[in-house]
């Protein structure tokens, strides 16, 4: 019985195939080729749209030394609160949300995935987990206590700027000078110049790189010229902010330049 049923199904399928073949043969060749072309073109365009939608990054990574104010800035972006100033985080803070300053705007606004990576030296390898999805990197600097931390901040920034994943994708970096609301805070221009000087020194001291490191590290700047951020393959800009008072407009502009609303 089962075999008879299978044979009947097989014969029915053959009849359908023959009928389909007859119908196809009745269609003029030009129309047939045009129809096939439209099907292929439509499929290709749909796959292309899905590919770009899937791969377009929407992550902004907050990095910098511990105590620079990254976590406060994270909270300001999320809910407009400083969470009472100093917050030391040992685990990444992350969330996908509409920026607090955009809450009152009408219409559909694209959420941003913000990640605050802890600044402690032992926890910095966590940064590599988020760089592949990064649309932009914000390197937060303490403008108030900048000079004692200038060397350490420069080393960390140097490591970010020479990472293969950052250079190859030309991920934009914003050096954000935080705590500028304080009277004794350094200006962004002063901080920029000092960071460039320190990174220039680091370039000279790291020229002898082991073969194992070469694959993961790029050389910064132009040979025989003093280093400047403008020489980087990716765009590096410097801005000011105050996480405590909520003045983060330059940061928000950077975010929306790289994650369109």
Image: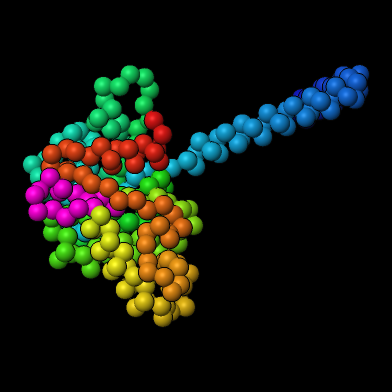
Residue 53, image x, y percentages: 50, 36
Is residue 35 left or right of 173 when viewed as pictured?
Answer: right
Residue 152 in the image: above or below residue 41: below
Quadrant that contains the N terminus: top right
Residue 60, image x, y percentages: 34, 45
At a point 34% along the width and 41% down the height, the residue shown is 254
Quadrant that contains the C terminus: top left
At a point 25% along the width and 37% down the height, the residue shown is 249
Q: Main secondary structure of the magenta part?
A: loop
Residue 54, image x, y percentages: 50, 39
Res. 250 image quadrant: top left
- Say whether residue 187 is magenta: yes
Extent of the magenta region:
175-188
Res. 213 image quadrant: bottom left
- Say whether residue 236 is magenta: no
Residue 116 in the image: above or below residue 40: below
Rendering colour mode: rainbow
At a point 37% along the width and 69% down the height, the residue shown is 226
The answer to whether residue 219 is visible is no
Residue 260, image x, y percentages: 41, 34
Residue 148 in the image: above or below residue 23: below
The answer to whether residue 38 is visible is yes
């Amino acid at each position: 019985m089962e075999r008879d049923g299978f044979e009947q199904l097989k014969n029915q399928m053959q009849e359908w195939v023959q009928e389909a073949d007859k119908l196809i043969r009745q269609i003029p060749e030009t129309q047939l080729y045009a129809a096939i072309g439209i099907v292929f073109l439509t499929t290709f365009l749909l796959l292309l749209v899905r590919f770009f939608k899937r791969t377009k990054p929407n992550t902004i990574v907050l990095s910098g030394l511990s105590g620079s104010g990254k976590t406060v800035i994270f909270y300001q972006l999320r809910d407009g609160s400083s969470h009472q100033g100093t917050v030391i985080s040992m685990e990444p803070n992350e969330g996908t949300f509409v920026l607090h300053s955009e809450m009152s705007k009408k219409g559909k606004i694209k959420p941003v995935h913000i990640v605050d990576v802890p600044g402690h030296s032992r926890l910095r390898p966590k940064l590599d987990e988020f760089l592949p999805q990064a649309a932009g990197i914000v390197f937060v600097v303490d403008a108030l206590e900048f000079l004692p931390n200038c060397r350490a901040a420069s080393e960390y920034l140097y490591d970010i700027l020479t990472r293969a994943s950052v250079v190859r994708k030309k991920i934009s970096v914003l050096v954000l000078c935080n705590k500028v609301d304080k009277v004794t805070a350094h200006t962004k221009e002063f901080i920029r110049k000092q960071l460039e000087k320190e990174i220039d020194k680091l370039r000279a001291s790291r020229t002898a790189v082991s073969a194992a490191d070469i694959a993961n590290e790029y050389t910064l700047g132009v040979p025989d010229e003093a280093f400047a951020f403008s020489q980087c393959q990716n765009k590096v800009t410097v801005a000011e902010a105050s996480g405590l008072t909520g003045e983060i407009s330059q940061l928000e502009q950077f975010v929306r330049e790289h994650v369109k609303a």
